[in-house]
């Protein structure tokens, strides 16, 4: 019986670790320049055009160019690799209040971010 419990615990541990690896994301998988497919909110829809991008740089800054407007934010990824936090930068100083996004999908060619909490829902779709 003890052997059965030990084997069951080992199997559950291996499956749990594998699931976390599959669902979690790393900074290196995010750190690329992504073209904007679309940005969608409750009362807002923007379809990306050539030259629009999100550039997640290795220095922890997101450089964004949308509709001829440039914006810079600090970004962090939580320890589970599921929540991306963006902190607007004004006069080279990051805000202490950020916006959280669930990484809905991230692979070699597609990144989908969905807002978490807040007063309205936003989904940004990006591609490489």
Image (spheres, rainbow, N blue to C red):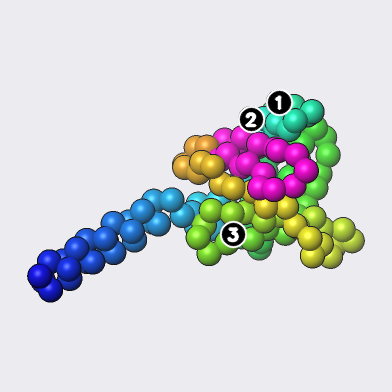
* Helix, strand or loop: magenta stretch: strand
Query: Label 1 vs label 2: CA separation?
Result: 6 Å
- Looking at marks 2 and 3 on the same chain, the residue that comes earlier in the sequence is marked by 2
Q: Nearer the viewer, mark 3 or mark 1?
A: 3
Residue lying at 73% horizontally and 52% vertically, measured from the top left: 99
* Quarter of the C terminus within the rendering: top right
Separation of marks 2 and 3 at Cα, in angstroms: 22 Å
Question: Where residue 121 sits in the image (x, y, percent)?
Answer: 70, 38
Reply above or below: 57 against 114: below
Query: What residue is pinned by disc 1?
Result: 47
Q: Nearer the viewer, residue 105 or 117?
A: 117
* Residue sitting at x 73%, y 33%: 41
Determine contact: label 1, label 2, CB under 8 Å. yes
Tag 3 near tag 1, CB within 8 Å: no
Residues shaded magenta: 111-127
Horizontal and vertical percent for residue 79? 53, 64
Q: Secondary structure at mark 1?
A: strand
Query: Per the image, is 118 magenta?
Result: yes
Disc number for residue 77 = 3
Q: Is residue 98 above or below residue 44?
A: below
Quadrant of the image containing the N terminus: bottom left
Residue at 53% x, 53% y is 82
Residue indicated by mark 2: 37
The residues bearing labels 3 and 1 have C-alpha atoms spaced at a distance of 26 Å
Q: Nearer the viewer, mark 2 or mark 3?
A: 3
Disc sitting over residue 73 in the figure: none
At 67% from the left and 56% from the top, the residue drawn is: 85
Is 7 situated above or below 120?
A: below
């Amino acid at each position: 019986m003890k052997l059965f419990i030990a084997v069951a615990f080992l199997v559950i541990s291996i499956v749990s670790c594998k699931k976390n690896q599959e669902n979690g994301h790393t900074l290196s998988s995010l750190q690329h320049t992504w073209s904007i497919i679309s940005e969608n909110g409750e009362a807002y829809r923007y379809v990306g055009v050539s030259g629009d991008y999100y550039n997640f740089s290795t220095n922890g800054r997101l450089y964004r160019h949308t509709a001829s407007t440039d914006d810079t934010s600090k970004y962090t990824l939580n320890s589970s690799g599921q929540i991306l936090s963006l902190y607007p930068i004004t006069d080279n100083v990051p805000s202490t209040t950020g916006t959280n996004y669930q990484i809905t999908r991230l692979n070699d060619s597609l990144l989908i971010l969905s807002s978490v909490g807040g007063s309205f829902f936003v989904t940004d779709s990006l591609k490489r």
